[in-house]
Image (spheres, rainbow, N blue to C red):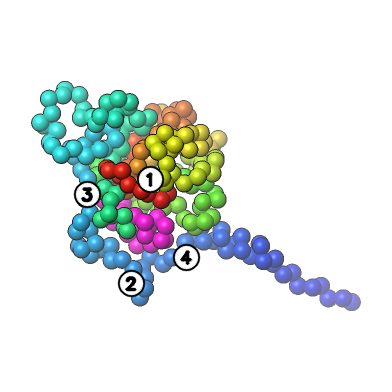
Amino acid sequence: MDKKKPFIVPNYLRQFGQSLTDIILPPQPLFRPQRGVHDYGAAESWADVRFLDEPCCDYCGFPFEFETSELTLSAAPCCGRCAGRKPSYDRARAAFVYDAASRSLVLRFKHGGETEGVTMFAQQMLRAGRKLTNGAQVIMPVPLHSRRLMKRRFNQSALLARAISKQSGIALETDSLLRKRHTPSQGGQSYVGRRRNVSGAFKISPKAQLRGKSVLLIDDVLTTGATLESCARTLKRAGAKRVDAIVLSRVVKPSTLPT
């Protein structure tokens, strides 16, 4: 009687399984001192970072160099861009400016896979967006397309959203807002190009229950706001009552940013 040959898992299935595991459990450990990972708890790591807070535009969070009490306007303080056209989201805030001083912090996290600073990042985001958490019912990260997720192995916005949810107690939903279209990188594109690039890129899961809810979007970098606006329009069409956003950093002056 012939013995059955043992089943050998094909290489392509083994590779797919490993990629799937890496997405769920990123292979980067949370602390790697032996490899000289950046010390996010050291004061010198943040010495030149420009943290953001009020006074700022009430809509997009663009920083002002004067106190809001000096404004003669009766309405909420507003930057020139938002005065000309209000964004689709209601309010946005950022923890710090994306510039030469903070670029390495963001890129090591976003593209280098260093997740050691997530807890501290979330703390700073909650500080800057403390007024936006009042009344927020659900936290959602800006989603990545599956192709980009397979390449990066984790969604940095989802990691930030999870940490913020844990620290704030606001419920986290990662499967309601989805990216239905793989878009080219936003880096190097104009404001109009960025808006066109993400137009119609998002969708809502059929199982999502958003009617009447206040949503808090989480992302890593705000450049022109095109991605947040596309997400906000999608959420509001699905019935969301309010969409605010907190990002880790934002561009204040034109800057090249790989996304």
The magenta region covers 106-125
Which badge, 3 or 2, is on the more N-terminal residue?
Answer: 2
The local secondary structure at tag 4 comes to loop
Residue picked out by circle 3:
51
Disc 4 packing (10 Å; few <14; some 14–19; many ≥20): few
Query: Residue 29 is drawn in which quadrant?
Result: bottom left
Does 218 appear in magenta? no
SS label for mark 1: strand
What is the C-alpha distance between the residues marked 4 and 1?
Answer: 22 Å
Residue identified by numbered label 2: 36
What kind of residue is marked 4?
A: Pro
Residue type (three-letter) at the residue carrying disc 1 = Asp
Q: Dot 4 corresponds to which residue?
A: 27
Task: Choose mark 4 or mark 3, whichever is in front.
Answer: 3
The number of discs equals 4
Q: Is residue 111 magenta?
A: yes
- Name the residue at 29% across, 49% down: 98
Q: Classify residue 86 by image quadrant.
A: top left
Task: Say what secondary structure mark 3 lies in.
Answer: loop
SS type, badge 2: loop
